[in-house]
Amino acid sequence: MKDIAIIAVGGYNEIGRNMTAIRIGKDIVVMDMGLRLDRVQIHEDTDVECLHASDLIAMGAIPDDSIMESIDGKVRAIACTHGHLDHIGAVSKLSHRYKAPIIATPFTADLINQEIKGERIFDVGNSVISMKAGERYQVTEDIELEFIRVQHSIVDCVFAAIHTEKGSILYANDFKIDRSPTLGEPPDFTRLRALGREGVLVLITETTNSGITGKTPSEQIAKDLVWDVLIGTEETRSGVLVTTFSSHIARIKAIIDAAREMGRKPVLLGRSMDKYWNTAARNGYASKDDIAVFGRRKSIDKALKRIMNEGKDKYLPIMTGHQGEPGAILGRVANGETDYLIESGDKVVFSAGIIPQPLNMSNRYTVETKLKMRGARIYDNVHVSGHACQEDHWELLRMINPEHVVPAHGNLVTHGHYLMMAEETGYSLGSNIHLVRNGQELLID
Ligand SMILES: [Zn+2]
């Protein structure tokens, strides 16, 4: 039988720039090609379309795929499991090096096509194949790729199962076990349990939140938190600004619904808000009716001016800038660079956690302080995570019952937490749970 190896290309030493190659004999399936956002000091409103792959690799911003030259095999397919930039953001920089199609769910494929179209340096000729959750793609005669529906903080997220004659390899990066999502269906537990019974050789799993005890609350809870803050108040006349992840369509919909309940007009502001909302609308996850979306700087500034003129209490602006990114709209409002003036008692709602990187923390502190100096009231962490916590990981492990486990998408700390949980479940480090670092190939016996 063909030997199987897992090649850790990126995302095994850090959170971001995911890329894993799975070698079955001489055939390779690549999973994800992502970007590490903090390394280029970029934010949701910035693009790296003009930067060269070698520069981005030197910055540690995209996976260093030089290891692929020493791997004896040919890449037959590239699959991306969801549309976050740390999973698709390097596709336009690296995929042209491999003569293989890129396979993703419709929403993700749409975003990938936009990345490729926006690329200024490389001519990416790879075909992009759109495949829905529940469908399969024949990679070679004896390798099949299957997408299985899960939940995360972006729509149309899947697990990828690579079926081989030795059993399947399940790539679970990223996910959350959400039984009451507000958009889309819960994870396909029936299929996951069946997969476990059929025999999973390797589980490759993210470990982002494995150090957090308990279970990640459902997105329904986040919706309740948002509604509680926006509607559960006597201060109904003040200006209210909300900032959240522009790719988090379910969350934005919850905020829009709350705006309507408040009798305010929701307005989406920001280049990435425009991009993700339009992509969601094209793919049936959102509607463009009755919602004003402004992506260009000039139109954003005009919209903010109109809001000031007509009355802040008539609108609910939803904008980029929750990490305090310089140049994003919330930062510009905090600096007084727009016509939207923050006055005493105005509310700023962060429907996002702080991504725990020093750069984010400092940017966020700066923006919050500036807003407070203008008299704003801050509501932070009106949010639940899109990543599985410890007990969710435990549940998946029990459901799938894999022979081997490889922690991915995390650093030594998060992998360490995962290892302790897995050892409690009966796995043992070095025998059937494997700590792999960027640039290493793990042979599965
Ligand atoms: Zn993600």
Image: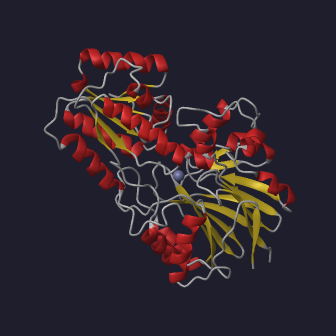
Frontmost residue, 236 versus 371 = 371
Q: Quadrant of residue 350?
A: top left
Residue appearing at x 71%, y 43% in the figure? 59
Answer above or below: position of 401 versus 253: below
Q: Quadrant of the C terminus?
A: bottom right
Q: Quadrant of residue 340?
A: top left
The total of numbered circles placed on residues is: 0
Any part of residue 426 in sight: yes
Answer above or below: position of 14 versus 361: below
Q: Is residue 385 left or right of residue 430?
A: left
Residue appearing at x 38%, y 22% in the figure? 336
Residue 442, image x, y percentages: 74, 70
Frontmost residue, 429 versus 274 = 429
Q: Is residue 176 left or right of residue 91?
A: left
Residue appearing at x 60%, y 65% in the figure? 412
Q: Quadrant of residue 70?
A: bottom right
Q: Residue furthest bottom?
A: 426
Residue 167, image x, y percentages: 67, 75
Any part of residue 141 in sight: no
Q: Is residue 43 left or right of residue 269?
A: right
Residue 310, image x, y percentages: 25, 16
